[in-house]
Structures are given as C-alpha cells and as structure tokens.
Amino acid sequence: MTTPAENLQEQPLVQHLIELRSRLLRSFLAIFVVFLGLFSFANEIYEFVAQPLQVFLPENSHMIATEVASPFLTPFKLTLFASMFLCIPFIFYQIWAFVSPALYRREKRLAIPLITSSVLLFYAGMAFAYYVVFPLVFSFFTSVGPESVAVMTDISKYQAFVIKLFFAFGAAFEIPIATILLISAGVLSPAQLASKRPYVLVGCFVVGMLLTPPDIISQALLAIPMWLLFEIGIFFGRFFKPAEIDTEDEDTDPDEPDDL
C-alpha cells in the first residue's frame, strides 16, 4: 500500500493544478449563486449592517453618498462580501477535499472537527464585532466630536470600515484552531506556548492597533479576546497529542473525498 505522500507523487503536477482549478471554480460558482439570490435584498442588507451606526447618529443627521455611483456600488459590494461570508463553509469544504488525499487517517479525523470549529469561530467573531464592538465604537466616535460638527458618514467609507473589522475579528477568533494545530503537529507544546504568554499579549495589542481604528476601545476589544482565545487554545490543546505516523496509517490508503 502507498502512503499519502507517495499517492500524491504518483499524480503529475498538472493533475493537481486541474483539481485546484476545479475546487476554485466551484467556490466562485457558489458565491455567484448566493449573490444572485441576495442581490434583490442589497439595500436591506446595507441597512442591517449600518444599523449599529445609525442608532447613534445625532438627530437630523444621516449617512451620505459623496460619489455618484455609491448608492448602487456600495450595497452591491456589501452583498458580494455577504455572499462570500455565507459560502465560507462550502469554501472550507473545498479546501478540505483538495488537501485530504495528502492526510493520514488520524489527521483526517482531527481535521473534520477543526474545520467545523473554524467556521463557527469565524461567524462568532463577526457576530462579536457586530453586536459588541460596533455599538461601543460608534457610540464613542459620535459622542466625542465638537458640537459644531455634524456627523454624516459616507456610505462607502462605512462599508470599507465594517468589512475590515468583520475580517479582523473573524480571523482573530481562529486563534484557538491555530494553537491546537501547532500542538497537534508537534511544533510547540502547551507548556512552550504558555511560556510565551507575555509576548503573545503584546502581539495581540500590536495586531489590534494595526487592524482597528486608532482608538483604545476597538484595539482593546480585539486584543483582549485574542489573548483569551489563545488561552482557550492552550487549554484544549492539552487534550491533543503530537501527530505520529503509525503503521496502520502507513499501510492504508487515505479515503478519497466525495466530489460534489
């Protein structure tokens, strides 16, 4: 019997590229189909995303469009991003189906719950940004300005702002998965990761500074959950042993993923 590595080596590079192209096309097609279904609700989607800011706008103040095409392009872009977010489970599955032939049986058993957790954590990060971070940040921003300045945010600027934070918090909530992968791969042990806690804490605030607006509230709201998620990853990582190749894996071909 061949090992996963030998099984992959038997296939030419062109075959891998064709498989990768197929997986990418399926992902793009899924996004396109979801986008077609959501496009008629583009304005409603934008209103929902803009709600955390609109509730804090002063009386007689509203959002504006400073470019001619913004009233159309901004909801259009936001709907496209929403389609991508909704297709994340399918995209993750396509990634899994592409790499699974190179994995041993034990790695496959570990990958499936990790992929599921990754999807849930990404959505949890977005929900945390929308329901916790946005109200606090927008309340702060709209209350500290001079009284003579009317707060009227441009809709395209707002869309770019919220998409950036959605991605930042969605990615930050993947830290437990990254931590568990490092432990299960034998790169670092839980004790070694715990010993680097001071550096990780500083790194979390640096990342929060780079990915969020220049205010201490949003920086702290990203950095502190990142640190807590790192601690959660260390805790659950203690239940995972470093990957070892056993004879059963070496003598058994990996199961091929079912094509959609």
Image (cartoon, rainbow, N blue to C red):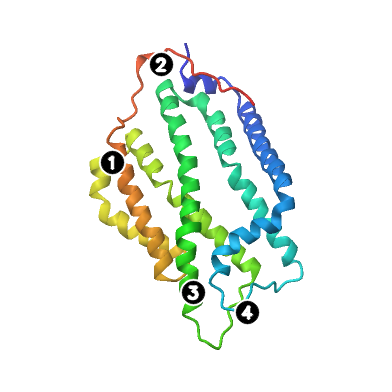
Is the residue marked by circle 1 packed among few (<14), some (14-19), or many (20+) residues within 10 Å?
A: some
User: Up-down: is 8 above or below 96?
Assistant: above
Q: Mark 3 sits on what residue?
A: 141
Q: Nearer the viewer, mark 4 or mark 3?
A: 4
For residue 235, which numbered disc appears in the image?
A: 1
User: Up-down: is 119 above or below 16?
Assistant: below
Determine contact: label 3, label 1, CB under 8 Å. Answer: no
Tell me which numbered mark, 1 or 2, is placed earlier along the sequence: 1
Q: Marks 3/1: CA distance? A: 37 Å
Q: Amino acid type of disc 3?
A: Phe
Secondary element under disc 1, as helix, strand or loop, is helix
Q: Amino acid type of disc 1?
A: Phe
Taking depth in this image into account, of 34 and 180 the one nearest to the observer is 34
Q: Mark 4 sits on what residue?
A: 60
- Residue 219 percent coordinates (x, y): 41, 64
Q: Marks 1/2: CA distance? A: 30 Å
Q: Amino acid type of disc 4?
A: Asn
User: Up-down: is 248 above or below 9?
Assistant: above
Q: Residue furthest right?
A: 68
Q: Nearer the viewer, mark 1 or mark 4?
A: 4
Tell me which numbered mark, 2 or 3, is placed earlier along the sequence: 3
Q: Residue at x 47, y 35 (%)?
A: 115
Q: Residue at x 26, y 50 (%)?
A: 196
Q: Marks 1/4: CA distance? A: 50 Å
Residue 179 quadrant: top left
Tell me which numbered mark, 3 or 1, is placed earlier along the sequence: 3
